[in-house]
Image (cartoon, helix red, strand yellow):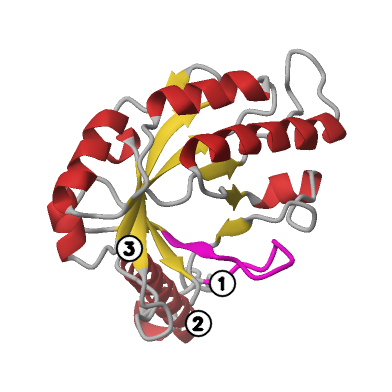
Amino acid sequence: MAKTKTRPRGKGRGGRPSLLWRLLAVLALLGIVGGVWAWWSMRHWQPDRTTFPTQGALVGSADGAVDFVALKAIGADFVYIEASASAFARDPAVVKNLDAARAAGLPWGALHKYDPCQPADKQAANFVTVVPRDKKMLPPAVELEQLADHCPVPVSDAAVVSELMTFLNQIETHTGKPAVLKLGREFEKTYPIAATLDRALWLSSDRVQPDYGGRPWALWTANSGLQTSAAEQPLRWVVVQK
C-alpha cells in the first residue's frame, strides 16, 4: 500500500507558507513597528502649547547632568528641583541644580519627598536647611507618594494627615508661599486629602490628563520620560493649567 505524504504544518501546496501563517507574520511585524513608533512618539511628545502655554521640567540627580541653558532654549519656562527627602536625606545635585537654574534665568521651585514614617518637624527642618529663602522662588512642592504601610512604628491615617499639615505649615512659613501637593494616585486613594487640604494639586499621568484628584489640577506631569538634548536621561515634563 502506497504511503500518503503529509505536508509540513503551516505550509500549503509546494511547501509555501499558508495564508494564515503569512497573515500572522504580517500582524506580528505591524505590532512591533507600532510598539516602536508609540515608544518613540512618547519619548518626544509634549502637550500643545496653545492649550498649555507654560511648560517646564522636574529634575534631580537621577537625571544626570542637566544643561539648564539648553533646557530653557528647548522651551522650559520653569524648573522644579528635587531638594530634600524624609528627615535627613537631600538630593546630591540640589546645590548644583539650584545654582545652574538661577544662572540660566529659569524660575525655579524646590520639591520635598514626604515620608509619613518620619516626624513632620524633622522633615521641615531638613527642607529649611536645604532650601534657601528666596522671594523669587516658586511655591514649594511636596511629593506625596510613599504610604505608611511599612513604617517601623505604626502610623494611623489620621496621624498621616495631621503630621502632613504640620509639615506644610512649617515650610510655608519658611518660603512665604502655599505649597503645591504633588499627589500620587495611591496616596490620594489611601488618604483622600485633595478634598480636605486647600492646596494646589500637581498630578501625574502620561499623555492623558489626570482626574484622580477629584478637582482641577494646577500642574500636570504630562510626560514622565521626555527625551531632550538638555539632559543625559529623559526628563519629567510638567505643564501648568491656564
Which stretch is magenta?
A: 208-223
Q: Is residue 162 left or right of residue 67?
A: right
Q: Along the polypeptide, which appears first: circle 3 or circle 1? A: 3
Disc 2 residue crowd, few under 14, some 14–19, many 20+, Cα 10 Å: few
The reply to whether residue 113 is visible in this rendering is no
**Residue 20 - label:** 2
Measuring 60% from the left and 50% from the top, which residue is drawn there?
A: 181
* Residue 135 to residue 33: above or below: above
Frontmost of labels 3 and 2 is 3
Disc 1 residue crowd, few under 14, some 14–19, many 20+, Cα 10 Å: few
Q: Is residue 145 left or right of residue 39?
A: right
Q: Residue furthest top?
A: 152
Q: Which residue is mark 1?
A: 209
Please tell me whether residue 80 belongs to the stretch shown in magenta: no
Q: Along the polypeptide, which appears first: circle 1 or circle 2? A: 2
Q: Secondary structure at mark 1?
A: loop
Measuring 23% from the left and 46% from the top, which residue is drawn there?
A: 101
* Residue 97 to residue 32: above or below: above
Disc 3 residue crowd, few under 14, some 14–19, many 20+, Cα 10 Å: some
Q: Secondary structure at mark 2?
A: helix
Dominant secondary structure, magenta? loop
**Residue 43 - label:** 3
Q: CA distance from mark 3 to mark 2?
A: 35 Å
Q: CA distance from mark 3 to mark 1?
A: 17 Å
Of residues 196 and 174, the one drawn nearer to the viewer in this rendering: 174
